[in-house]
Amino acid sequence: MYQIKVKKLPGFDDLTIPQKMSEYASGFDIYAGVKEDITLHPGDRVLIPTGFALEMPIGIEAQIRPRSGLALKYGITLLNTPGTIDADYRGEIKVIVAHLGNETFTIKRGERIAQMVFMKLPEVTLEEVEEINETIRGSGGFGHTGK
C-alpha cells in the first residue's frame, strides 16, 4: 500500500479532501473549490480549483478523470483527460471542466466535480534505434480497421 499525503490549502478548510464513495471504488472524488457559483453555458470551459495539493511517492501518478454521472446527465467532462499529476508536483490540483451539454450547468463550492485515480508507473528507458520490427498492422491507425 502507498501513502499519499494530502494538504488542504489556505481558504479551503470547509472542503472535504478527496474520498472514495464506495468500498471498492477506484477513484477518489474531488470537490470544487470555487469561491462562488460558476455557470457554464454549452461550449464553455473553465479551470476549477480544488483546494488541495499532493505528495506522492516516486513511481506513482495521479490521473484526473471525469465523473460518469456528470458526463451522462449534463455533458460535463474534463479536457486533457486523463490529466496527469506527477510525483514531483506540489501545486494545487485544478481541473479543466468542459461543458458539452445543451443547457447551462452550475458548479457550486463543495460539489463533486472529478475523480482521481492513482497508478503505479513502470520503470522505462528509451533506446534510439535506426529500425523497428514490422507488424501486420504497421502504421495503420485512427480507424483503419473500420468505423
Image (tube, grey):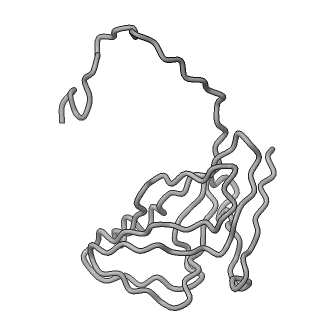
Q: Quadrant of residue 42?
A: bottom left
Q: Residue 36 in the image: x percent, y percent?
A: 52, 91
Q: How many marks?
A: 0
In the rendered structure, the answer to whether residue 46 lies left or right of residue 58 reads left
Is 105 rendered above or below residue 79?
Answer: below
**Residue located at (44% from left, 86% from top):** 38
Is 100 rendered above or below residue 84?
Answer: below
Is 49 rendered above or below residue 21?
Answer: below
Q: Residue 106 in the image: x percent, y percent?
A: 41, 84
**Residue located at (69% from left, 82% from top):** 12
Q: Residue 60 in the image: x percent, y percent?
A: 69, 44
In the rendered structure, the answer to whether residue 64 lies left or right of residue 138 reads right
The quadrant in which the N terminus is found is: top right
In the rendered structure, the answer to whether residue 84 lies left or right of residue 133 reads right
Q: Residue 104 in the image: x percent, y percent?
A: 31, 83
**Residue located at (81% from left, 51% from top):** 3
**Residue located at (33% from left, 11% from top):** 135
The quadrant in which the C terminus is found is: top left
